[in-house]
Image: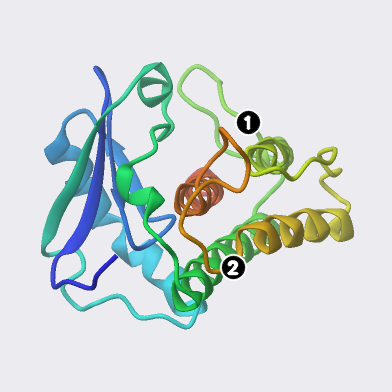
Amino acid sequence: MTAQSATALILEIGKKRVFACAADWPGWCRSGRTEEQAIETLAAYLPRYAPVAERAGLALPPAAAGSFAVVERLPGGAVTDFGAPDKIASCDYDPLTGDDVHRIMALTSAAWAAFGDVADAAPARLRKGPRGGGRDRDQIIEHVIGAEAAFARKIGVRQPAPASGDAAAIAAMRTAITETLGRASAGAAPLPGGWPVRYAFRRIAWHVLDHAWEIEDKSDG
């Protein structure tokens, strides 16, 4: 995608929820009940996303949250309304240069590292919702790892979900993911019918950061 002064956005519009995803910044993606709310929430999360970009050796433009340009609107579905970005945009099939791949790999790796830091610092028991619902830290960790094993199958990487305490197996799975996605390409999915590279990176990075921020928010109080 070409550089531009405004932050390029993909909007996924469901009946009950809208996701605003920064097309060039995997993981910077938030939701709201309307397009306006989703974009406002995305802007509000810039201070939480910027350290991830910095960890990847990248700097967000100074006006990243001050100017947005919607490059694509996608009709959402049940998964969108449930709470996850689910639709593949046409720009997710854009060709990738070596620099493109290096950049989005660095951001995804930084998201994984940020999640690890947050999980390590969090208490085992997290604050619950008003009716006592919600997962504790270790349950969220297991969910993230299990989801990544499912995501990996979308790009042709098939292996059992590692145990949450098996750091070597988790690292091996993530290495397999990045090796499969991490090469210049025409942008097509590595697996017929699977996820194209740009979408795979942005979905994986969104999921891990969404839960990192959930753990942070529920560690207080």
Question: In the drawing, does residue 106 fall left or right of residue 141?
Answer: left
Residue 29: percent from the left, percent from the top?
35, 49
Disc sitting over residue 135 in the figure: 1
- Give left or right: position of 51 versus 116: left
- Mark 2 is surrounded, within 10 Å at the Cα level, by few (under 14), some (14 to 19) or many (20 or more) other residues, namely some
Task: Please determine whether, in this image, residue 175 is positioned above or below residue 56.
Answer: above
Residue indicated by mark 2: 183
Q: Amino acid at mark 1?
A: Arg
* Mark 1 neighbour class, 10 Å CA radius: few under 14, some 14 to 19, many 20 or more: some
Q: Position of residue 132 (x, y in %)?
A: 55, 20
* Front residue of this view, candidates 215 and 128: 215
Camera-side residue of 127 and 148: 148
Q: Determine which quarter of the picture holds residue 23.
A: bottom left
Question: Which quarter of the rendering shows the N terminus?
Answer: bottom left
**Residue occupying the point 24% across, 55% down:** 44
Of mark 2 and mark 1, the one earlier in the sequence is 1
Check disc 2 and give the amino acid type.
Arg
Residue 131 in the image: above or below residue 200: above
Q: Nearer the viewer, residue 121 or 80?
A: 80
Tell me the element at label 2. loop
The residue at the point 79 percent across, 40 percent down is 158
**Distance CA(mark 2)–CA(mark 1):** 36 Å
Question: Residue 114 location, x and y as percent?
Answer: 58, 64
Image label count: 2
Q: Which mark's residue is nearer the viewer, 2 or 1?
A: 2
Residue 206 position in % (x across, y down) = 47, 48
Colour logic: rainbow
**Residue that appears at 15% across and 36% down:** 35
